[in-house]
């Protein structure tokens, strides 16, 4: 289209992303003074990534550009990896996905960059074979993604079974679909090669699935407010629970120090809180915390 390598399907995806960009930007304007504006900012960043991905991958490589094809392909793959990593970080945080606790986001990013250099850029520049290089690189990542998918499915199904409302059950299912959107990227490239219609459309669908969940955010906030029965708690218990929900990483010693109570007294309060709110552990509090900070504290 437009005398470029851009396919109609990619152009349509870009238009959808632009519409989403406008909608989210307008919403962000109205919630700017609220605490949950970070939720909108993060999603806005994801949408921008989707646009960048489709534009770059749709235009490159193009023999009419005054840049050699190898350089164009390397540029496109660097952008593709950056967008995939951004997408991965977003869904990991949004759906509270846990893979390997010892690896931080920065270490995962560094590992991905080193792998791209060793398994794609170096073989490609040395052999000039795009097909061979992408098979090396993508096969390695696909194996990791399949292993991670097993973990994701188990986590999300476990959460799904414990959910009491449809909106949160939907959230968990979308978490699985979003991860499969990421897996679709190496799969479609390995199977179909540089087929812009299949590759970019399938990955873009992953973004659009996450977008559906974004528009359900308001419903999740309402459900969260309804399902934390603060009215059952004493004033001190409410204070403790809100502290934990606002900052789930606080240690019990820190909480007792902030409230000037002993850890034994805190333990007794927590036992009462868990019974009244039907929470089994601090781990469940961490799962509630993210939505709570965006809803109750908005």
Image (cartoon, helix red, strand yellow):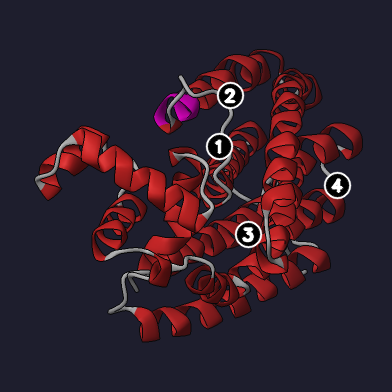
| Residue 107, magenta (yes or no) | yes
Please report contact status of discs 3 and 1: CB closer than 8 Å, yes or no: no
Eyeballing the image, is 114 above or below 153? above
Can you name the residue that lies furthest to the right here? 191
The residue under the point 28% across, 79% down is 33
Q: Position of residue 204 (x, y in %)?
A: 72, 58
Span colored in magenta: 106-110
Circle 3 packing at 10 Å, graded few (<14), some (14-19), many (20+), is some
User: Which callout, 4 or 2, points at the residue further toward the start of the chain?
Assistant: 2
Binning the other alpha carbons within 10 Å of mark 1 as few (below 14), some (14 to 19) or many (20 upward) gives some
Provide the residue designation for mark 2: 116
Tag 4 residue? 195
Q: Where is residue 127 shown, x and y percent of the image? A: 71, 14
- Closer mark to the observer between disc 3 and disc 2: 2
Q: Main secondary structure of the magenta part?
A: helix
**C-alpha span from label 3 to label 2:** 21 Å
Give the left or right position of residue 168, taking residue 130 as reference.
Answer: left
């Amino acid at each position: 289209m437009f005398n470029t390598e851009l396919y109609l399907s990619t152009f349509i995806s870009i238009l959808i992303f632009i519409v989403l960009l406008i909608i989210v930007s307008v919403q962000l304007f109205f919630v700017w003074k609220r605490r949950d504006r970070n939720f909108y900012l993060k999603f806005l960043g994801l949408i921008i990534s989707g646009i960048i991905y489709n534009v770059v991958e749709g235009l490159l490589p193009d023999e009419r550009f005054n840049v050699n094809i190898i350089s164009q392909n390397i540029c496109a793959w660097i952008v593709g990896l950056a967008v995939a990593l951004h997408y991965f970080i977003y869904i990991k945080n949004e759906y509270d996905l846990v893979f390997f606790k010892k690896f931080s986001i920065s270490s995962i990013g560094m590992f991905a960059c080193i792998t791209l250099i060793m398994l794609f850029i170096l073989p490609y520049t040395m052999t000039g074979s795009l097909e061979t290089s992408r098979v090396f690189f993508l096969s390695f990542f696909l194996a990791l993604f399949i292993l991670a998918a097993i973990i994701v499915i188990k986590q999300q199904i476990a959460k799904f079974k414990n959910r009491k409302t449809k909106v949160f059950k939907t959230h968990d299912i979308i978490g699985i679909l979003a991860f499969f959107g990421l897996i679709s990227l190496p799969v479609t490239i390995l199977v179909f090669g540089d087929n812009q219609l299949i590759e970019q459309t399938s990955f873009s669908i992953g973004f659009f699935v996450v977008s559906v969940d974004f528009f359900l955010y308001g419903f999740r906030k309402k459900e969260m407010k309804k399902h934390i029965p603060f009215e059952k708690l004493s004033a001190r218990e409410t204070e403790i629970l809100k502290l934990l929900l606002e900052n789930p990483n606080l240690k019990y010693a820190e909480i007792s120090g902030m409230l000037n109570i002993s850890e034994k007294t805190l333990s007794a309060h927590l036992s009462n809180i868990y019974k009244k709110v039907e929470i089994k552990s601090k781990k469940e509090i961490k799962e509630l915390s993210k939505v709570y900070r965006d809803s109750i504290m908005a």
